[in-house]
Amino acid sequence: MAERPAANFLTFDTEEWYHANYDGMDPAALRGRGSNFPAQMEDLLALCAAAGARATFFVLGAVAEDHPGVVRAIAAAGHEIASHGYGHALAYRQTIDEFAADVRRSVAILEDVAGAAVRGYRAPSWSIVAANYHYLAVLEELGLVYDASVFPVRTFLYGIPDAPAHIHRPVVAGRTLNLWEIPTSVVRLAGRNMGYSGGFYFRLFPGLFIAYAIRRANRRGRPAVVYLHPRELDPGERRLTLPAKEAFIHYHGIGGARAKLVSLLQKFTFTSVIDHLRTLDPTLK
């Protein structure tokens, strides 16, 4: 029987197989080379419909330009469309003006294609870190309701290990922003924070452990944030040529990821970020 102790967040970083931020990568150079993306998204929407789950799709502006019909199908199915930036550039490699322009451009494209307001943002590769944390004020200035870019871990690519692990209003330059922060879910292992509910961590850990960690978060009154990329559910998608470490991070466990997601959809209730925030603030539209 499905467990319904709390509504967790189901989120998808909606991008193509070539969107990655390892050294030397240029996603724009591979744009238009073909992919299984439309079929992947059709499958994801069918899985959500079968489970009665609502999700947040963080969509790249470039993807919305290339696949407007997919974005409209997401919106028509009742899911939330949020921004993932335009072309998957790392936010901490942009100036604050470049960051603002990138987010603004993506929001304009998404709202035009989907015909719905964009309320949230997630930086590519969790690239809001300590050095550019003040960029969150830009999101407030642009009228967004929430950010979902902070990962309370430390890795070679991203993370703020001492960031709050619960939903909160971030403080920038001594001022509490009128913006919600939705940190990515972590669990304490060996005295440090570790992700478990998405991406590499989702593919690495057994499904039973992921379900245990979600239940643990729910018992503490916290929704878990599940996050996946369409390519992670499709072992037949083409692959980047990467060094051994990066290839392991990017592709390990892809063969079992879809089955894990199906199992979680059967066990837990999932909703979009904005729907949950409306329970915290009924004035949100």
Image (cartoon, helix red, strand yellow):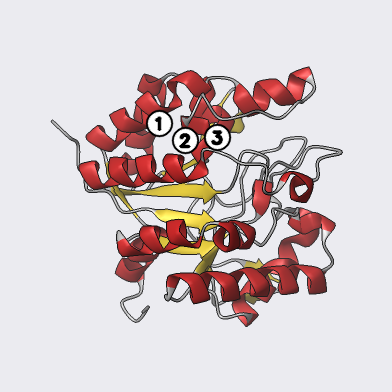
Is 74 positioned to the left or the right of 184 in the image?
A: left
Residue 282 can be seen, yes or no = yes
Q: Residue at x 53, y 20 (%)?
A: 253
Q: Pinpoint residue 281: horizontal percent, then vertical percent.
A: 35, 74
Whichever of callouts 2 and 1 sits on the residue coming sooner in the sequence is 2
Q: Residue at x 74, y 74 (%)?
A: 101
Is 10 positioned to the left or the right of 142 in the image?
A: left
User: As displayed, is residue 13 above or below residue 118?
Assistant: above
Q: Nearer the viewer, mark 1 or mark 3?
A: 3
What residue is pinned by disc 3? 199
Marks 2 and 1 sit apart, C-alpha to C-alpha, by 8 Å
Is 103 positioned to the left or the right of 118 in the image?
A: right
What residue is pinned by disc 1? 213
The residue lying toward the viewer, choosing from 282 and 18, is: 18
Q: Pinpoint residue 228: horizontal percent, then vertical percent.
A: 49, 40
Disc 2 crowd, CA 10 A, few/some/many (<14, 14-19, 20+):
many
Is 57 positioned to the left or the right of 245 in the image?
A: left
